Image: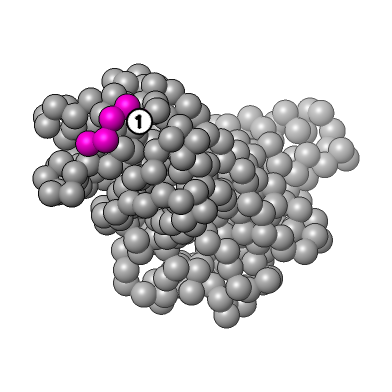
Amino acid sequence: MDVAREAGVSHITVSRVINDHPSVRPETRTRVEAAIQKLGYRRNSVARALKSRRSSTIGVVIAGSELFELPRILSGVEAAAKQAGYWVSLASRQGESGTGDLVETLRRLTDQSVEAIAVVADRPVAVDALTSLVLDVPVAVVMSGGVPNLDLGCVEVDQERGSRLAVRHLLDLGHRRIAHLTGALRTFDAQARVAGWRDELAAGGGEGAMLEGDFTAESGFRLAHALCSDESGLPTAVFAGNDQMAMGVLAAFAERGVRVPADVSLVGFDDMKGAGYLVPALTTVRQDFDHLGRSAIELLVRMLGGERAAQEKLTPELVVRRSTAEPRTAL
């Protein structure tokens, strides 16, 4: 070993210095540390993990392409992992290529001796891959629609409840014709928001059309133009699949001379950064993505400590701004 040769000590002494063993004399420690710095030595974390069976690393797999607030989720993941004494190893699996790629990604992470894995999933195909998968590390799914495998943890925001909050707000204002412009219906979030809109609308005696989008501002823009061209007339309120779509709706309505909220009230979902600075400021449903990421890591740490897997739902919050008001006239 070059460091041992440079410092004039045994390999065992170098190992003791690296692992901060108290039996090493101060002058010997200083000599070894100087040799380490001179030679640019870095400890082999993989070898250390194989020896100790601990890597102090949590794997995070991104499984989906409609994860618009991913940076905020990862911020919470990294902060919570660091606080618990773990590093994060990030892997990505995109698209609709089936379950095989995701399973292979998970296998590769376990080969790297990660101690636990968080899977950030936006659609059923990702969870399907985990249903019967057996790994020797704790696994938690983030942003899913629930998982049938009770050995897996799950942390998600209650999307259906958030949708019902949005629709109930509009119903309480007096709206009865409330259209829903959906996100991509292949995703958990869009499916849950449709269910919440439909159930709350029915409970409140309302009605409204559903038009399918894909969570992008472009789809919100296109669908809002379709509403304006509908011979049956505009609804008095629109519930957009997310804030990106709501932004597109605002642009389309501005082109068509439709005033928000004087003519049509508008509600989004997510409370994206800048939603309060749109014109008008957007009423929306807030998801705390940072908290979502933190909660997933905290669950995994508890599972590493011996707790059973749990399925947790976080509560969203309605943020009322200036894009909603009582309906003034029938359009």
Quadrant that contains the C terminus: top left
On screen, residue 275 above or below 89: above
- Taking the spot 69% from the left edge, 42% from the top edge, the residue there is 85
- Taking the spot 33% from the left edge, 38% from the top edge, the residue there is 237
Point out residue 239 in the picture as x, y percentages from the top left corner.
36, 42
- For disc 1, the marked residue is 327
On screen, residue 210 above or below 329: below
Magenta stretch: give its range: 327-331
On screen, residue 24 above or below 186: above
Which residue is at the front of the view, 156 or 230?
230
Q: Is residue 44 visible?
A: no
Which residue is at the front of the view, 276 or 43?
276
Q: Main secondary structure of the magenta part?
A: loop
Residue furthest front as drawn: 330
Q: In the structure shown, which secondary structural element does the residue marked by tag 1 occupy?
A: loop
- Taking the spot 62% from the left edge, 63% from the top edge, the residue there is 139
* Magenta region includes residue 153: no
